[in-house]
Amino acid sequence: QTVLRDHLEGSALAQAFSWIGMALALSPAIGLALGSLLVAADGYAGVQAGLLLIAALLMLGCVTGLRESRPAQIAPVALRPLLRQLLGDRWIWSQALLVMAFNVAMYSWYALGPFVFARLHWPASWFGASGAVLALGSALGAWANGRLLRAGVPALTRIRIAASLVLAGGVLAALLRGQPVIVMAMLPVVAGFGLAIPNVLGQALRGYAHCLGSAGALFGLLYYLLIGAAMAVVGALQMLAPSIIACALLALWLLRPRSALA
């Protein structure tokens, strides 16, 4: 995100995030399938070993091949004053909560889906196959974002459409509870994620052009702490549909006409 922000801004940045979203659309299918194989081979330890290997390869690639992207005219900033500024910024909080809401809506399936399948005595391989549905939803969301962007639809409107899709998915999950086709409820949820996140990330740091790298790092820390706290609540409650609906309603509330966003 920081590298892109160092080179692009405005609609060009949103378009770049959209293209990346389309590339990442394959990740749920690959991740769930690979995870199922690693679990079958060596359980939890196999998954952790796989993640460690991937992280090591990515770190090696960054060290050897990633060039510095920060423009020469931008000087490093002190983190403590910047952190105080971010924490006092209503816009940043609204963006962080939006990122949290859309991520938690999608991650709820990763966290609760296996238990849903286990309670209904469905084969574990079915959960791995659900990655194909998630990949399709992510691709549809990224494609819709590109089309709406080219049509000149404002970012706020695109995010509202995304929140409505997530809400529809949550309601559908409630209606399909206990049926094998419940995974189809995640299609609009993931499509909403793919539509919203590029737009939220593309505009989140609009007032921090002088320190995008540092601000981006602190912004990421903020929304990941929020995601972690929310996922702890989702895990404790063990309720898929209400979790998704709550995330959608939070997003829609943040996007109301008289909020910090509008």
Image: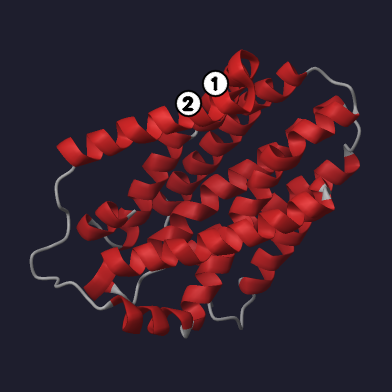
Which of 224 and 138 lies nearest the eye of the viewer? 224
Q: Amino acid at mark 1?
A: Leu
Is residue 98 positioned above or below 42 on the image? below
Which of 262 and 67 lies nearest the eye of the viewer? 67
Q: Are marks 2 and 1 in contact (CB under 8 Å)?
A: yes
SS type, badge 2: helix
Which of 24 and 162 lies nearest the eye of the viewer? 24
In the image: residue 236, left or right of residue 157: right
Q: Which residue is mark 1?
A: 34
**In percent of the image, x 65 and y 57: which residue is there?**
163
Q: How far is the residue under mark 2 from the one under mark 1?
A: 9 Å
Tell me where residue 64 appears, x and y as whole percent: 16, 36
Q: Amino acid at mark 2?
A: Gly
Is residue 134 positioned above or below 82 on the image? above
**In percent of the image, x 60 and y 43: which residue is there?**
191
**In percent of the image, x 62 and y 33: which residue is there?**
134
Give the crowd class for mark 2: few <14, some 14-19, many >=20 residues within 10 Å.
some
SS type, badge 1: helix
Q: Which residue is mark 2?
A: 50
Note whether residue 182 is visible: no
Tell me where residue 115 appears, x and y as whole percent: 81, 34
